[in-house]
């Protein structure tokens, strides 16, 4: 990407840049507003718009060759194409529009390929190549303008000339904005992320680049508002909500005001799933007490539960060697199985009493049958050396580890998290994955933040977790989840984003 920061040394140019940036932000906001109407009016029909059929130069078949020196970029592009399917499901796109979106999302960073570079600005280089291939004009437009590419004030003359010769196509605005959303939900090095995590990734990869940071923050705010509007068109989002330190404090009672908010949300047609690290039986007990029918996430995403039914969606393979390795580090362990929890390692009776206070099953003394859902290690967050040793051991075993509380670390199957069971539930119910809102407070909630349409954290969450979210609601002690649910009913997701936008 061309960076002409040196051009703005003179004060007069700096003032002009500020004026141009403000104008660009107004243009982008207007595009985001109009795009929703174009989605609904133009995309749910099977018309061809302004496109033509062609075989092009089959550039898709050359991707591995073009990016053999930069596989991370290609993973990002393919992840964006995967997100495109979820965007299409949310918006109800017709097959032709769905194909346009998938193609443009895959192609959006094509201009980074060294063989295709002309101007050094990847949106332009990719668009020019696709145009020569005879690619769909809407796809070319989306690649040329995705993520505000044409609105920067520091573009060199050759790049400005390209944009000047190609005025925006209003009828393709929907595709530009949808591809931008896909771009921002695909991690810079491959993988699916939430908008907050994508922003943090950009800031960390470009330390000290204040101009890029300002552009990124402005763009993520626009994409967040756009995403909220798209979710609102589907209706009330499916809320997937953590329990401890989010809905209530461990060992406490659910506040009456929050209980009433849960009930009101459901009466209006909203769906709520608990997303807990607790045992399936404990999770079901909470759901029953709070009047929450339907599916819930239990044991940090290794299973989904509903009215006495436990569906195991992931489990630890050959867990016993890992249990022995962690026991040798002097740790107290709780091994979770569908039938209960068994104490292992340096387990103490006071730990069992703490489990009871947390509203969790007390570990039993005997070995239990069935697959291991997860292993919980009792280890305070201040024991940093011991935690680092545990994390190395778990990583060497090919498993995932995350912290769920200042006292507990969770060992899970590789790549598993609350989002694993949440995705299974959405698929089971035929629910668009992005028509959802995740709510949590800790590291073990991050995966469902990356999965759902948008994410919210309570204000008592650690800063590193809060940075991953789209909205920061009042803390657990102030009934933040209840306030969020009431706002969703009254003002939609966009209203919640406007009220509690994450910094």
Image (tube, grey):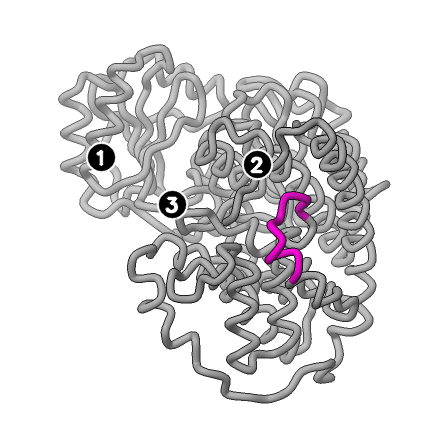
- Foreground mark, 1 or 2? 2
* Above or below, comparing residue 366 to residue 69 in the picture: above
Q: Could you say which is closer to the camera, residue 97 or residue 332?
A: 97
Q: Secondary structure at mark 1?
A: loop
Q: Secondary structure at mark 3?
A: loop
As for residue 319 lying within the magenta part, the answer is no
Q: Quadrant of the C terminus?
A: top right
- Residue drawn at x 66%, y 20% is 475
As for residue 159 lying within the magenta part, the answer is yes
- The numbered mark at residue 416 is 3
Q: On the image, numbered disc 2 is attached to which residue?
A: 5
Q: Could you say which is closer to the camera, residue 369 or residue 19?
A: 19
Q: Count of labels shown? A: 3
Q: Is residue 264 visible?
A: no
Q: On the image, numbered disc 1 is attached to which residue?
A: 367
Q: Quadrant of residue 13?
A: top right
**x, y (%) of residue 61?**
38, 77
Q: Secondary structure at mark 2?
A: helix
Q: Earlier in the sequence, mark 2 or mark 3?
A: 2
First to last magenta residue range: 152-161
Q: Earlier in the sequence, mark 3 or mark 1?
A: 1
- Residue drawn at x 45%, y 62% is 117
Q: Would you say the residues marked 2 and 3 are in contact, meaning their CB atoms lie under 8 Å apart?
A: no
- Foreground mark, 3 or 1? 3
Q: Quadrant of residue 458?
A: top right
- Residue drawn at x 73%, y 55% is 230
């Amino acid at each position: 990407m061309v960076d002409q920061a040196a051009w703005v040394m003179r004060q007069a140019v700096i003032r002009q840049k500020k004026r141009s940036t403000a104008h660009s932000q107004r243009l982008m906001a207007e595009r985001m507003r109009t795009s929703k109407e174009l989605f609904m009016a133009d995309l749910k029909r099977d018309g061809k718009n302004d496109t033509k059929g062609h075989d092009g130069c089959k550039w898709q078949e050359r991707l591995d060759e073009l990016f053999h020196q930069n596989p991370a970029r290609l993973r990002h592009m393919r992840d964006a194409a995967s997100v495109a399917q979820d965007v299409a499901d949310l918006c109800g796109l017709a097959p032709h529009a769905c194909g346009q979106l998938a193609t443009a999302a895959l192609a959006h960073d094509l201009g980074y390929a060294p063989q295709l570079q002309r101007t050094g600005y990847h949106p332009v280089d990719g668009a020019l190549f696709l145009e020569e291939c005879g690619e769909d004009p809407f796809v070319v437009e989306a690649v040329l303008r995705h993520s505000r590419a044409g609105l920067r004030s520091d573009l060199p003359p050759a790049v400005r000339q390209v944009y000047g010769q190609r005025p925006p196509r209003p009828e393709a605005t929907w595709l530009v904005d949808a591809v931008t959303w896909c771009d921002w939900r695909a991690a810079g090095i491959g993988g699916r992320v939430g908008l907050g995590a994508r922003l943090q990734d950009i800031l960390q990869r470009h330390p000290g680049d204040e101009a890029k940071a300002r552009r990124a923050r402005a763009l993520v705010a626009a994409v967040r508002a756009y995403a909220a509007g798209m979710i609102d068109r589907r209706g009330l989002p499916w809320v997937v909500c953590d329990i401890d330190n989010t809905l209530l404090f461990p060992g406490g009672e659910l506040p009456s005001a929050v209980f009433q908010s849960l009930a009101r949300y459901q009466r209006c047609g909203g769906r709520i799933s608990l997303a807990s690290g607790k045992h399936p039986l404990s999770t079901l007990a909470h759901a029953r007490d709070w009047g929450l029918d339907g599916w819930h996430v239990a044991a940090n995403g290794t299973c989904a539960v509903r009215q006495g039914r436990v569906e195991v969606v992931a489990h630890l393979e050959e867990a016993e060697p890992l249990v022995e390795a962690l026991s040798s580090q002097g740790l107290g362990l709780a091994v979770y199985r569908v039938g209960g929890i068994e104490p292992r390692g340096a387990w103490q009776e006071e730990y069992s009493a703490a489990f009871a206070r947390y509203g969790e099953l007390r570990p039993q003394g005997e070995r239990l049958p069935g697959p291991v859902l997860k292993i919980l290690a009792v280890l305070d967050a201040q024991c940093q050396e011991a935690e680092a040793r545990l994390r190395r051991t778990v990583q060497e075993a090919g498993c995932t580890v995350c912290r769920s509380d200042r006292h507990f670390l969770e060992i899970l199957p590789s790549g598993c998290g609350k989002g694993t069971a949440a995705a299974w539930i959405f698929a089971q119910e035929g629910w668009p994955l992005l028509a959802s809102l995740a709510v949590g407070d800790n590291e073990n909630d991050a995966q469902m933040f990356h999965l759902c349409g948008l994410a919210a954290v309570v204000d008592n969450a650690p800063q590193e977790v809060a940075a991953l979210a789209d909205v920061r609601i009042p803390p657990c002690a102030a009934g933040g989840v209840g306030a969020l649910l009431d706002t969703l009913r009254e003002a939609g997701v966009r209203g919640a984003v406007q009220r509690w936008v994450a910094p």
